[in-house]
Image: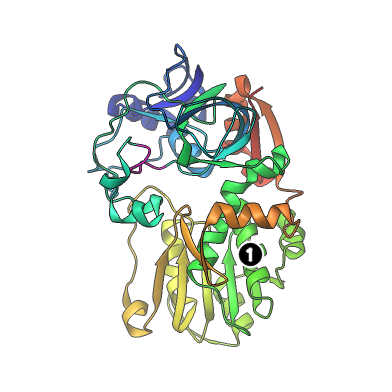
């Protein structure tokens, strides 16, 4: 098994953090903790596990965080005990080439994508009766055993490699989708999960910040689930404006952001020195960028009792003025990954909803994949994303 992984030794990460301050070339050097390794193919650790041969995988923002060593010791993740190794690549599609004796939902030859990837009870090898309350409900991304040790030893791999092994429940069969559709299910599911956290009401004015992969699909799903809301987009890359409108955006904001927000929402803008505040802003804001300083602004761009859905993130601590939260009675909702949803009155996994929509051709999927690289050229792919992010939406690594 060949696989790309992150070796999380503090010494290695510290070296890259220091060197990258002087040159971005450090990210691609031999000193990088992101390495391409080869292991003897692992045996299936339990009879409900599966072996998958990768076809292609997308590069996610979380993969970029590892590649750039952008994690901070100031975040809530830092106290969590974790493995020294993180396998990269979860936006993936592959073919089942081996199954355990108790696998029921999959067969050899099935095409699958990876549904769960954060450290959850199932991925740690826990028996179902030992699952935490979140995992029992199907909210695997909110696992309460995140920091507990895994019962699985040895390499398992992930999407950025020639193959990986996984428990049956981690996978979703996608035989009816094209490879390009299947590789997009995971990022589409992230966007849908965020929208389902707070579906706007009819006539709501909605701001989507960022028209990258996630932001574009927040636009698409918001318009699909609430066609009578008005969607405004804040995106400084004009190359993405037309695609945002194709997916359902009504207006693109331009110029000074405070003035643009005040004009779009017919609100009052007040200013003393550099301190500015808006009264009467957006009903809903989806922050799909997550820069620390932006959090302070989004709180001031919401109307009283408005809702901020925090989708984008950075792995560093930030500071902000909390005044608008209590003064304006704001709602702040965090949205991470995917899980169990209430959709059309039924409980369904986010992946299943996206798969069904794609199968019925209810979603626009063309136009998201902008670049393709061979797996061996992964450093070129990451270099593109670091140096020319404005030119990309989704970069794919071909694993075959």
Instruction: Name the main secondary structure of what is drawn in magenta.
Output: loop
Please give the residue where the numbered disc 1 appears in the rendered image. Answer: 221
Q: Please tell me whether residue 192 is drawn above or below residue 19 in the rendered image.
A: below
Spot occupied by residue 62 in the image (x, y as percentages of width and height): 47, 42
Q: Nearer the viewer, residue 121 or 390?
A: 121
Q: Front-most of 230 and 108?
A: 108
Q: Does 121 lie within the magenta span?
A: yes
- Nearest the viewer among 340 and 369 is 340
In screen coordinates, is 281 left or right of 140? right
Q: Residues within 10 Å of mark 1 (few under 14, many from 20)?
A: many
**Residue 220 can be seen in this image:** yes
For residue 179, which quarter of the picture? top right
Q: Position of residue 8 (x, y in %)?
A: 34, 29
Residue 162 horizontal/vertical position (percent): 57, 21
User: In front here: 104 or 71?
Assistant: 104
Q: Residue at x 48, y 56 (%)?
A: 312
Q: Residue at x 28, y 33 (%)?
A: 150
Vertical relation: 99 (above or below) 123: above
Q: Position of residue 291 (x, y in %)?
A: 46, 56
Disc 1 on helix, strand or loop?
A: helix
The magenta-colored residue range is 118-123
User: The C terminus appears in which quarter of the rendering?
Assistant: top right
Report which quarter residue 267 is drawn in. Answer: bottom right
Q: Is residue 183 magenta?
A: no
Identify which residue is drawn at 54% across, 66% down: 195
């Amino acid at each position: 098994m060949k696989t790309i992984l992150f070796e999380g030794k503090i010494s290695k990460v510290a070296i890259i953090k220091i060197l990258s301050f002087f040159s971005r070339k450090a990210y691609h050097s031999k000193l990088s903790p992101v390495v391409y390794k080869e292991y003897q193919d692992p045996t299936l650790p339990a009879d409900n596990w599966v072996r998958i041969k990768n076809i292609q995988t997308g590069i996610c923002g979380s993969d970029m965080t590892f590649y750039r060593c952008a994690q901070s010791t100031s975040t809530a993740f830092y106290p969590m005990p974790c493995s020294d190794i993180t396998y990269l690549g979860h936006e993936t599609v592959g073919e089942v080439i081996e199954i355990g004796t108790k696998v029921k939902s999959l067969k050899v030859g099935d095409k699958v994508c990876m549904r769960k990837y954060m450290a959850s009870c199932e991925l740690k090898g826990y028996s179902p009766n030992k699952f935490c309350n979140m995992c029992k409900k199907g909210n695997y991304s909110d696992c309460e055993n995140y920091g507990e040790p895994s019962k699985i030893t040895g390499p398992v791999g992930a999407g950025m490699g020639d193959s990986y092994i996984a428990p049956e429940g981690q996978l979703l069969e996608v035989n009816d989708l094209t490879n390009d559709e299947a590789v997009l299910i995971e990022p589409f599911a992230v966007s849908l999960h965020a929208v389902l956290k707070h579906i706007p009401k009819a006539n709501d004015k909605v701001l989507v910040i960022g028209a990258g992969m996630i932001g574009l699909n927040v636009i698409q799903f918001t318009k699909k689930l609430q066609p009578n809301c008005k969607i405004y987009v804040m995106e400084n890359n004009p190359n993405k404006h037309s695609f945002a409108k194709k997916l359902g955006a009504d207006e693109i904001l331009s110029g000074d952001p405070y003035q643009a927000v005040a004009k779009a929402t017919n609100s009052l803008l007040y200013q003393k020195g550099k301190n500015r505040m808006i009264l009467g802003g957006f009903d809903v804001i989806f922050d799909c960028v997550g820069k620390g300083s932006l959090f302070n602004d989004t709180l001031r761009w919401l109307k009283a009792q408005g809702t901020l859905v925090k989708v984008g993130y950075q792995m560093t601590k930030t500071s902000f003025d909390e005044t608008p939260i209590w003064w304006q009675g704001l709602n702040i909702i965090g949205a991470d990954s995917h899980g169990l949803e209430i959709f059309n009155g039924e409980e369904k996994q986010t992946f299943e909803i996206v798969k069904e929509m794609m199968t019925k051709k209810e979603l626009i999927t063309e136009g998201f994949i902008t670049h393709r690289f061979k797996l061996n050229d992964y450093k070129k792919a990451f270099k593109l994303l670091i140096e020319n992010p404005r030119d990309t939406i989704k970069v794919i690594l071909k694993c075959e």
